Image (spheres, helix red, strand yellow):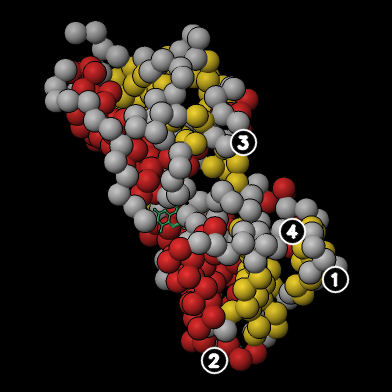
Amino acid sequence: MTRRDIVILGGGSGGAVAANHLGESIGKDHNVILIDQKPQHYYQSSYLWMVRGWRQPQDISRDLSTIERRNVRFLNDRVTYIDTDSRTVATANGEVKYDYLVSSLGLQTRPELIPGDFHVAHHTWEMDAALRLRDALKDFTAGRLVIGISAPPYRCPPGPYEAAWLIEDGLVERGIRNNVTIDFFTSEPGPLGGNGQPSEFMREHLDERGINLHTDFTIDNVDGDAKKVRSTDGRELPFDLLFIVPPHRPAQVLLDSGLADDTGVEVDVDTLATRWENVYAIGDAANMPASKAGVVAHQEADVVAHNIAHELTGHGQPTRLRLHTL
Ligand SMILES: Cc1cc2nc3c(=O)[nH]c(=O)nc-3n(C[C@H](O)[C@H](O)[C@H](O)COP(=O)(O)OP(=O)(O)OC[C@H]3O[C@@H](n4cnc5c(N)ncnc54)[C@H](O)[C@@H]3O)c2cc1C
């Protein structure tokens, strides 16, 4: 049997699951290679708990090299170009050929796309930023807290609402809730798009906690000197502490290689296959009618890994994605 090279890009939620699955199923007979620019996998959902001090970075990180126990080779390297003609992935340190490619490179946070003084805004959408917000909150005892969403899509749609509740709860615990006003803005007509029960749930819980909701609030600019966020329709929210979920975009390498536009990589919604032969895209960077969520990336990874293993071994039947999520 010819050994095939199955290359997985990104060791986040989708890539780690795909690599584990393929390593276990076919890793002894084929070459399963995982590439990530970071040496560690971070469990992003816990960034919110880090802000409260309930988790430390080491509690939510795992060395990606441990995946080698599962018949997967790990390359700690940055992917710089994907050439689907020559079936080659270029990295900062070399080249890797593939027979099958699974891309799970996620979305990048791009705070610099917030108009104005974006650097005065905190967030919890990356590990280092979450730690900075944790420290800033320790020093924050009174004043105006503004939390907002620049624009969808972003990782984990309910995440900003959960962040607001956790922060509000921390102020209550410290006995300083009455010293702080909290405003929450979103560019959408309502929470989570503005329709349905999940949206109502978010509204009710903001209301219960005395958090003022501002909808259809598209940022015109952040003014760090005046300490105000202004919307394109002329509203102003003054702040002492500011938290904005930054804009997200697909990984630059997908844009540079022509695999994605700003909406992500076009995929078949049943199989996650792209228009390039033996190339699959899963997770946040796949243009799917689904939330940008780890639970979605996980299910997509299982489908793609199963189908690649089936194609190489002939065992079982091919499968299709049937998402189980809210
Ligand atoms: C605060 C927060 C809370 C969340 N809460 C939840 C939750 O409760 N439930 C839920 O289901 N989801 C949640 N999510 C969302 C979830 O974490 C993401 O949807 C999920 O991680 C996406 O998986 P992915 O594999 O597509 O990308 P990621 O997990 O982001 O992984 C992408 C990987 O690609 C690597 N990479 C990128 N570019 C390159 C390159 N050029 N070269 C090499 N490597 C590269 C990165 O280093 C990274 O490891 C949350 C996210 C955040 C930020």
What residue sits right under mark 3 in the picture? 262
Q: Nearer the viewer, mark 3 or mark 2?
A: 3
Within 10 Å of the Cα at label 2, are there few (<14), some (14-19), or many (20+) other Cα atoms? few
Residue 36 is at least partly visible in this image: yes
- Residue at the spot of label 1: 226
Label 3: state its secondary structure: loop
Q: Residue at x 43, y 66 (%)?
A: 197
Q: Are marks 4 and 1 in contact (CB under 8 Å)?
A: no
Whether ligand 1 has any atom under 8 Å from the Cβ at mark 4 is answered as: no
Local packing at callout 4 (Cα closer than 10 Å; few below 14, some 14-19, many 20+) is many
**Foreground of the two, 312 or 42:** 312
Report crowding for label 3: few under 14, some 14 to 19, many 20 or more residues within 10 A (C-alpha).
some
Real-space Cα distance between discs 3 and 2? 44 Å
For disc 2, the marked residue is 175
Q: Position of residue 29 (x, y in %)?
A: 20, 18
- Three-letter amino acid code at the position of disc 2: Gly
Residue 296, percent from left and from top: 37, 46
158 over 143 or under it: above or below: above
Q: CA distance from mark 1 to mark 2?
A: 28 Å
Q: Earlier in the sequence, mark 4 or mark 3?
A: 4
What amino acid is labelled 3 in the image? Asp
Q: What residue do we see at 73% from left, 53% from top?
A: 114
Q: Residue at x 64, y 85 (%)?
A: 180
Q: Which residue is mark 4?
A: 219
Amino acid at pointer 1: Ala
Q: Secondary structure at mark 4?
A: strand
